[in-house]
Amino acid sequence: MRGTMNINNEDQAKETIILWQADSPRAQLKNLRLARESLELSQMYYEQKGNEPGMARATACLSIITARISEIEAE
């Protein structure tokens, strides 16, 4: 298990998913859920600060992470 990585943009989200694909589905889900929680906190922070670009990045990353979670859960 590789543990959570700091995801700051869509490319990092996609790269992280690729790295984690070598792990078991259970480990992937754990890491993806932790990443989602972190991104949700980032999104709230950016919203509180009125940082529109930051909110957009966090939202895009959340979409990527959430889609991967759905893929694994559907398997």
Image (cartoon, rainbow, N blue to C red):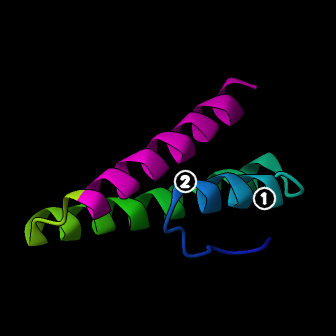
Q: Could you say where residue 60 lies in the image, as x and y percent from the top left?
A: 43, 46
As helix, strand or loop, the secondary structure at mark 1 comes to helix
User: Residue 20 has which mark?
Assistant: 1
Q: Which residue is more in the foreground, 13 or 70?
A: 13
Q: Residue at x 55, y 47 (%)?
A: 65
Q: Main secondary structure of the magenta part?
A: helix
**Type of amino acid at the residue the image marks with label 1:** Trp
Farthest top residue in view: 74
Q: Which residue is drawn at 36% across and 48% down?
A: 59
**Type of amino acid at the residue the image marks with label 2:** Glu
Is 58 colored magenta in this rendering?
yes
Q: Where's the N terminus, which quadrant?
A: bottom right
For label 2, the crowd category at 10 Å Cα-Cα, with few meaning under 14, some 14 to 19 and many 20 or more, is some
Discs 2/1, front = 2
For the magenta stretch, what is the residue range? 53-75
Determine which residue is flagged by label 2. 10
- Image vertical order of residue 1 relative to residue 53, above or below: below
Q: Which residue is more in the foreground, 7 or 2?
A: 7
